[in-house]
Each structure stands twice: as structure tokens, then as C-alpha cells.
Image (cartoon, rainbow, N blue to C red):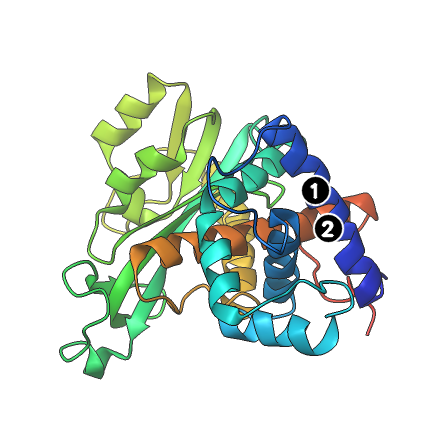
Amino acid sequence: MLPIDEFIIWVFCHVTDHLDALSRGHKLRGRGFAPSLTDSEVITMEIVGEFLGTYTDKGIWEYFRSHWLHFFPNLGCRTTFVRQAANLWYWKMRLQNKLAVNLGAFADDIHLVDGLPMSVCRFKRAFFSKVFRGKAAYGYCAAKDEKYYGFHGHLLISFSGVITAFTVTTANADEREALWELLPGVHGLVIGDKGYISASLHEDLLVHCIDLQTALRENMHDDRDPEYVKMLKSARRQVETVIGRLAERYNVERVRAGDIWHLISRMFRKTLSHTVAVFLNRCFGRDPLQFDGLIAT
């Protein structure tokens, strides 16, 4: 597929075009000196770095400093790069949302929702950790059958695998409450796991033209068609695939930030990088979630 240099150029061109369309020619900052690196260059470096598995600010900066300085000759010190990248969190969110719209994610009649653990540190060190003190909390991951300390990510995707929304709460937050933050602009069937079981929530969402369906627990009576329930369970594998990509390639389950500001910025760049990869696969007629082989080695 694409050589790495062509991949970087492709991402830069699309980021520039979409960022110009979103800003409508207005400056992204109202005061101060213009940075040496353009905002499109910074976002491009983040998208490419995350896709390559270089998920830390330092790692991304060192990678482009060592290998692609001729593409980004104005790349300065790491502190300036990190600060500029964090300040662009809003535009990374807007870019991801625009790409999701272009990919038809919000027009899809079926969406899938699930959560994932985001640990701040090892469980045994949580009592002594000062990172996110008062913000992180203890939680339990049923999929891994383990307790952890940190946050809980909530992910909503279209049936085709495009990330529609992503939010972060404390690890002990109720998934059903966080669901409301993910649903603006969505309609139709939303499939969740057993953690979203709630008759009252189901009724409230129907008012907004959203049909929340989940598998039921073994001790609960289910009068739905067994084939329909089987379809729900089968469809949920798509969101598990996306979470697997985010966990393995983007290391989303490990919080590598010291404050909420940097955490939010890094979460948006991960979801943006994932959406860009899906968009590129669509352009080449590939499986949207087949990231291996997208860049020629």
C-alpha cells in the first residue's frame, strides 16, 4: 500500500483541507505569535505517530525529529510541540467528527456501545499515586475480571466501525449515565452489553427515537426471538474489534498524561487517528478495520 512518506503527505493534505473548511479561513488562535509549526503539521504528526504505535508525546516528537525533519523543518523543542498539540484538542475533536459524518457514521441506523478500562497506574500502586488524585477512582472491568484504578472510556461506533463518539468518566461511573453523552446526532438501534440493562433508560431513549437493546442476564426472562438475540450478540463483535484496535495499536487503556487537559487531547488524537485510518481504507476499497498492511514497510 502507501509508503510511509506518501502516507504522511496524504494525511497532511487531508488535515489541511478539513481544518481550513472547519475554520472557514479564520485564525485558530486570537492572540499571540504564530507558532513555528502550523497546526496542520502538528495534528499530522500526532495522527501518523499514533497509527505507528508511537503513542507518547515524547515518542512522536523524537520520531519525527530523527526521521522526518526534512518534512517538518520548523519542529522546535519538545515542550513547545506538546503544548501546541494539547491546545488543539478542540480541533482534533471537530476533525474526527467531520470525518465520521463524511463516512456516514451518524446516518447509520445501527450503533454499538461499550466501555473500556483506562488505568492510571498498577493497582498495587494506586494508594500511593498522586497522579489524578481526587479525579481517578477504583473500578472493575468485567471483561478482564479485574479491579483497576483510573478512568472508564465509553465508546460509540457505527455498524461499519467508525467511531461516532468517545467520552471518559471516573472508573466507578455508571455506564448508563455516560451513554447520554454519546448519543447526540444518533438514531435507530443501539446495541450494548449487559451493563446497559435498564427498563427506564430504554423507555427514555425511545422518546429520542433510539432503541437500546442488550442481551439479558441468565436469571432474566427474554421473550424476544432467539435469532434476534443471536444477531445482537454477533453484531457486538464489531465494537470489540474497534476496542481491540484502540488497545493494541493506540494503547488507549493506559493513561499517559498528568492532567485532564492532556488526557482529553490525547484521547481525541487517538480516535482521530483511528478514523483517518478507516477513511484511508475506504479510499482504497479495503476492509475499514484492516489496519495491517495499510502502510508499506
Relative to 21, say whether 208 is above or below: above
Q: What's the mark number on residue 12?
A: 2
What's the amino acid at mark 1?
Thr
Which residue sits furthest bottom?
124
Local SS, label 1 = helix
The answer to whether residue 165 is left or right of residue 74 is: left
Does the CB distance between marks 2 and 1 fall below 8 Å?
yes
Give the residue at x 49% y 63%: 80
Rendered-image quadrant of the C terminus: bottom right
Which residue sits furthest top?
207
Near-viewer residue (118 or 133): 133
Give the residue at x 37% y 58%: 263
Q: Alpha carbon of mark 2 to alpha carbon of mark 1: how far?
A: 6 Å
Q: Quarter-wise, where is residue 172 in the image?
A: bottom left
What's the amino acid at mark 2?
Phe
Rendered-image quadrant of the N terminus: bottom right
The answer to whether residue 4 is left or right of residue 255 is: right
The answer to whether residue 16 is left or right of residue 218 is: right
Local SS, label 2 = helix
Q: Position of residue 239 (x, y in %)?
A: 51, 51
Near-viewer residue (111 or 216): 111
Q: Quarter-wise, where is residue 67 in the image?
A: bottom right
Q: Position of residue 99 (x, y in %)?
A: 63, 37
The answer to whether residue 67 is left or right of residue 55 is: right
Specify whether residue 287 is in view.
no
| Residue with the mark numbered 1 | 16
Specify whether residue 147 is in view.
yes
Give the residue at x 60% y 53%: 43
Near-viewer residue (199 or 265): 265
Q: Position of residue 50 (x, y in %)?
A: 59, 64
Near-viewer residue (254 or 74): 74
Q: Position of residue 192 (x, y in %)?
A: 39, 43
